[in-house]
Image: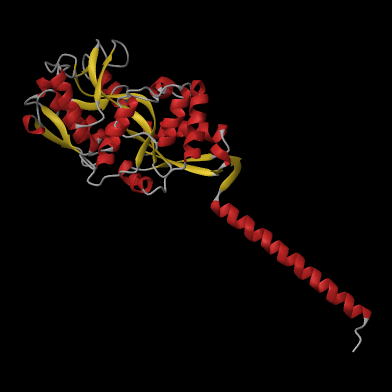
Amino acid sequence: MIMQPRKILAKQIGRKFIRVLFSGFAVLFVSGWLNILGPSSALGAEGKPLPRSLIIATHAVGTGFHADGSVVAKMVSERSPMTMVVRPHPGPPAWLPGMNNGEIEFGVIVGSDGATAYRGVGAHRKAYPNMRLLMIGAPMHLSFWAPVASPIKTTADLKGKRVPSGWAGLPIIQYTGGAALANGGLTWDDVVKVPVAELAENLRAFMEGRTDVLWHSVGAPAVQEANVRISGGVRPVAIRTSPESLKRMADFNPGTYMMMLKKGAAVGIVEDVPLQSEDITVVAPAQLPEEVVAAILKVLWDSNDELRKVTPRMRAWTRERMVSTQAAVPYHPAAIKFFRDKGVWSPDMEPLQQKLLGR
């Protein structure tokens, strides 16, 4: 049977419509998968694609660690093709499992917390062996604080005194505070333990006269408040500086070391004083691709002058501090390559890196 011209035309149009429709579905399918996989159009090292977005985990909103992570995220998002999203948590135990599995790309953590989490000791019953150091930021100084008129001058003077303890909500402080006691040749059994759950309760106990000392970091608002409300102000309890004392402190809480603060460096620093210190660090999983690590470090290195102006806390986030022999977690291989290329990976770092990899 011979088809009419009108029917032939309709059949041809139908076939063309099906081809166009199929092509459209193919484009949508491929585009959808590209969006799911997430690489941006930008390329990293060796021409490998960079992800569209990244996560940086921090402590809760309102903490200094959240502020630090927010500054890092701002720089990365503004100066690279990647968007870095800040994801706050109650504390590192909430995000460390995700990082160890490679599900979270970056995190902000203090040195001793990272060191104990990496090894599965102290406050961390489980080890997170895939944690790697991206860079070191500013130092944080921790101390017991006493009224200026108090006879408690050094950590050894805390024997028999009423000291905040327990720290159910922040178990890492049981170790940082315990390290201060160890520095003075003491243990928690040598003091009168006054249970507190977290920092706010610790401040209340001190202000109400239930403890003889306050535990906090230099520059914390709580220290400023205590300095105003306590007659004569407050000052930090100095750590002892003998090699034996410093070793006891570091052995009790790996990642801590001594720094001398000059008079007037912050509220309550009424004279030059040696204090327990540790570093604020940015960590990443060992599984994180090298091109991503290199791209992030390039932003933070190249934009360092601007980074340090965003908040007062960021002033000490210098290029010179990014690599340190105080590191307590091994560096990511791509970070080592980056810092070698910049000429800041010193010969002393290689034996330290190998030692840390041995955990």
Residue shown at the point (11%, 15%) measured from the top left: 151
Image quadrant of residue 169?
top left
Residue shown at the point (93%, 79%) measured from the top left: 5
Residue 94 picture location, percent across and down = 33, 46
Residue 317 picture location, percent across and down = 41, 23
Is 322 left, or right, of 110 in this rendering? right
Residue 186 picture location, percent across and down = 9, 27
Residue 180 visible at all: no
Please name whichever residue, 238 or 111, is drawn nearer the observer in this view of the structure.
111
Is 137 left, or right, of 207 in this rendering? right
Residue 22 picture location, percent across and down = 71, 66
User: In the rendered image, which quarter contains the C terminus?
Assistant: top left
Report the colour scheme: secondary structure
Image quadrant of residue 203?
top left
Please name whichever residue, 79 or 353, is drawn nearer the observer in this view of the structure.
353
Residue shown at the point (38%, 25%) measured from the top left: 323
Is 307 left, or right, of 43 in this rendering? left
Is 80 left, or right, of 11 in this rendering? left
User: In the rendered image, which quarter contains the N terminus?
Assistant: bottom right
Residue shown at the point (86%, 76%) measured from the top left: 10
Furthest toward the bottom, the residue is 1
Residue 159 visible at all: yes
Tally of marks: 0
Please name whichever residue, 198 or 258, is drawn nearer the observer in this view of the structure.
258
